Image: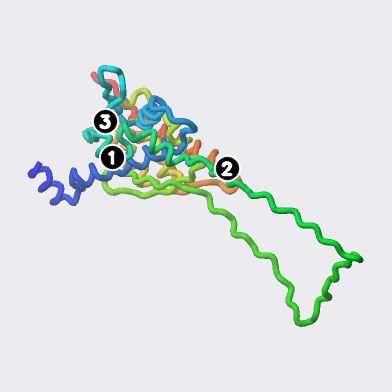
């Protein structure tokens, strides 16, 4: 471990502890995101979403088949649920889900008491005439709401890129990403992250991460980007197609030998 740290310091690489802490933060963010998206609490569906994200989930049950703990791992980093956060422990999962889905409080309105007044002659409401000193009240202009986004810290091998992806399309990258059949190195997460980098315009970073994961496909041209008449969801799927192409290994051409 000491030798590895010395080599990393000489080359300016990230230390194992930094990488582990970064992956722990990434897992914690996705655990909270998964619980927020669940309409009802279902621990099996929770584990399924984590596995679809590319994590290795190992639940632990007692003799009565009651869930007592689980671990989440990725590559060489494996965490107990308590290490991710106390609220993600098996005994606290349902309580955490309820906190993320608070029930609307019902406010009881006390009926107003009816009062009857009598008058000899109904009076007409008098509308005051506007005077020159009164100023017209201009209607307030409400600012347009900005779309909600999620931040992803993507390790390209040489640096970590922080990208913001709209919540309305981020599921496209994880649910529709796939790895070419002849690539045994890359994962679905690698392809999804590459598509995200293309989506925000980090072409060099996308090329670097695809080449480090066995890809040899051609990189996009320098004028890559979203077209003026292109919908964001269509552009996201076009980024996925390009990422899938970038992860195809280079074809080796063999010549004729005498």
Q: Is 231 or 106 nearer to us in this picture?
A: 106
Give percent across and percent down for residue 7.
12, 46
- Mark 1 neighbour class, 10 Å CA radius: few under 14, some 14 to 19, many 20 or more: many
Decide: is 103 above or below 54.
below
State the residue at coordinates (58%, 48%).
Answer: 228
State the residue at coordinates (81%, 61%).
Answer: 117
Q: Secondary structure at mark 2?
A: loop
Q: In terms of sequence position, does the residue under pointer 2 or pointer 3 come before the other? A: 3
Give percent across and percent down for residue 94.
39, 33
Find disc 2 in the rendering and name its residue. 231
Q: From the viewer's perspective, tell me whether residue 7 is left or right of residue 148.
A: left
Find disc 3 in the rendering and name its residue. 71
The N terminus, quarter of image: top left
State the residue at coordinates (60%, 46%).
Answer: 108
Q: Is 123 or 53 nearer to us in this picture?
A: 123
Which is in the foreground here, disc 2 or disc 3?
A: 3
Find disc 1 in the rendering and name its residue. 84
Residue 209 visible here: yes
């Amino acid at each position: 471990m000491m030798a590895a740290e010395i080599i990393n310091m000489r080359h300016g690489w990230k230390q194992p502890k930094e990488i582990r802490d970064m992956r722990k933060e990434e897992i914690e963010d996705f655990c909270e995101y998964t619980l927020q998206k669940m309409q009802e609490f279902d621990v099996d569906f929770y584990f399924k979403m984590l596995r679809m994200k590319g994590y290795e989930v190992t639940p632990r049950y007692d003799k009565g088949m009651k869930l007592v703990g689980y671990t989440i791992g990725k590559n060489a980093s494996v965490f107990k649920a308590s290490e991710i956060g106390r609220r993600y422990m098996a005994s606290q999962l349902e309580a955490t889900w309820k906190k993320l889905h608070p029930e609307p409080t019902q406010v009881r309105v006390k009926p107003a008491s009816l009062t009857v007044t009598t008058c000899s002659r109904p009076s007409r409401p008098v509308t005051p005439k506007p005077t020159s000193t009164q100023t017209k009240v201009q209607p307030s202009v409400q600012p347009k709401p900005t779309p909600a986004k999620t931040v992803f810290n993507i390790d390209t091998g040489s640096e970590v890129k922080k990208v913001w992806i709209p919540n309305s399309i981020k599921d496209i990258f994880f649910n529709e990403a796939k790895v070419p059949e002849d690539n045994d190195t890359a994962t679905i997460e690698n392809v999804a992250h590459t598509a995200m980098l293309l989506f925000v315009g980090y072409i060099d970073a996308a090329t670097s991460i695809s080449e480090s994961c066995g890809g040899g496909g051609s990189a996009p041209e320098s004028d890559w980007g979203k077209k003026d008449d292109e919908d964001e969801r269509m552009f996201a799927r076009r980024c996925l197609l390009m990422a899938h192409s970038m992860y195809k290994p280079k074809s080796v051409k063999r010549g004729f030998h005498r």
